[in-house]
Amino acid sequence: MSKEHTIAVIPGDGTGPEVIAEGIKVLGALSYRYGIHFKFFPWPLGGEHYLKTGELLPDRVINELKEMDAIYLGAIGHPGVKPGILEREILLRLRFELDLYINLRPVTLLPGVFTPLKDKEPQDIDFIVVRENTEGLYIGIGGVFKKGTPDEVAIQESISTRKGVERCVRYSFECCRKRDKAKHLTLCGKSNVLTYEFDLWERVFQEIGKQYGNIATDYHHVDAICMWMVKNPEQFDVIVTNNIFGDIITDLGAVIQGGLGIAAGGNINPEGTAMFEPIGGSAPKYAGSNKINPLAAISAAQMMLEYLGENEAAGALQNAVKKVVRDDLKSMEAGKMGYSTEEVGDLVVGPM
Ligand code: IPM
Ligand code: MN
């Protein structure tokens, strides 16, 4: 019997609970098969909970979450709550308070999954974006002056710290080293305009790169990266970038790998805890209809298993997902899969 893993489960809003239920189902099957011991602790955070109780993310909950081995998150977002509140007070606050400084977002096209990129095959779309997750434009520092007047000023500040950039860049080199692919790390920035910020990133990238002689490096501006991700995604192995650029290019990444139905990510503190989630939102229009694709949440569970060191189970889960998308699902889109949310979960459990 392996070590017991404590997992905080935050199903959240909209379709979050439905997809998380399938992820837990799959983890249950793996636990049985591989003798892994999970202890799940549910937390009722999100828009629904906020509207009922007025509570967003109490300090007490943060402290309890810090003690968990990992957090499994469905989706946070509610049409009844003004945009920005839940994002800032729950999702972003978790990233900051737990110092989840890496946002790891693999972009992998599995065989049998539709990509909107013409003539691109699974071997062409297989890279990882490492997004810095605690700095940049996301820090929420700024303000308005003379609001509502013609002289109004809005300021939104961006920071990059040496510590923050170094730990993210180092993680990216390590990620590239461990990944048995092209050994090629790309820095994505905008050094022609953001001359202060990306001067720091470029210097750190060069400095740390010296310690990784067998990893080839290059640099592209973020606008060019968007173009290359569509035209020649095969050139990428690992891309490291700042918070906002990472946010934007990973939506593009999600769509070329088959859409939000399948794209998963991890918010990671390599020295602390980590939170795994489907990249898509709460999709309120599909809530409760048993139509949403749970594979993104299930793949997030796979990333969580890897993070927990349960590599055998993670591999088995990956193979099961590959089989289901190749042999069973008609589409990755909600309502078009040919199966319900629950049935897709059952299909994944089937071969395990
Ligand atoms: C994401 C989301 C969040 C982000 C939002 C909901 C705050 O888009 O995880 O990519 O911008 O980071
Ligand atoms: Mn995003």
Image (tube, rainbow, N blue to C red):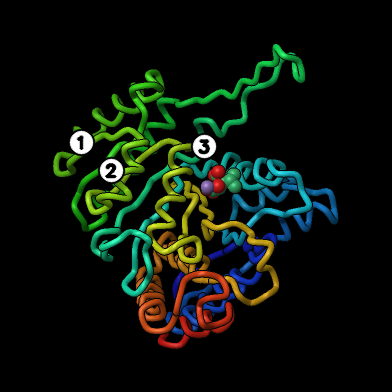
Nearer the camera: disc 1 or disc 2: 2
Query: Percent from the top left, x then y, of residue 310?
Result: 40, 68
Instruction: Please state which amino acid type lies under the numbered disc 3.
Output: Thr
Q: In the picture provided, is 311 more to the left or to the right than 263? A: left
Instruction: Please state which amino acid type lies under the numbered disc 2.
Output: Phe
Query: Residue, x 62% and y 47% (percent of image)?
Result: 91
Residue 95 vertical placement versus 152 (above, below): below
Q: Are marks 1 and 2 in contact (CB under 8 Å)?
A: yes
Residue 49 vertical placement versus 122 (above, below): above
Task: Say the numbered circle drawn on residue 134.
Answer: 3
- State how far apart marks 3 and 2 are (Cα): 19 Å
Query: Percent from the top left, x then y, of residue 205?
Result: 28, 31
- State how far apart marks 1 and 2 are (Cα): 9 Å
Q: Secondary structure at mark 3?
A: loop
Task: Check disc 2 and report the residue beneath it.
Answer: 173
Q: Of marks 1 and 2, which one's residue comes earlier in the chain? A: 2
Q: Of marks 3 and 2, which one's residue comes earlier in the chain? A: 3
Q: Residues within 10 Å of mark 3 (few under 14, many from 20)?
A: many
Query: Residue, x 36% and y 43% (percent of image)?
Result: 226
Kindly tell me whether residue 25 is visible in this rendering: yes
Furthest residue toward left = 214
Q: Is mark 2 within 8 Å of ligand 1?
A: no
Task: Check disc 1 and report the residue beneath it.
Answer: 211
Q: Nearer the viewer, residue 213 or 50?
A: 50
Query: Residue, x 48% and y 63% (percent of image)?
Result: 300
Query: Residue, x 31% and y 54% (percent of image)?
Result: 127
Q: In the picture provided, is 49 more to the left or to the right than 325? A: right
Q: Of marks 3 and 1, which one's residue comes earlier in the chain? A: 3
Q: Quadrant of residue 334?
A: bottom right
Q: Are marks 3 and 1 in contact (CB under 8 Å)?
A: no
Q: In the picture provided, is 19 more to the left or to the right than 322? A: right
Query: Percent from the top left, x then y, of residue 2?
Result: 44, 72
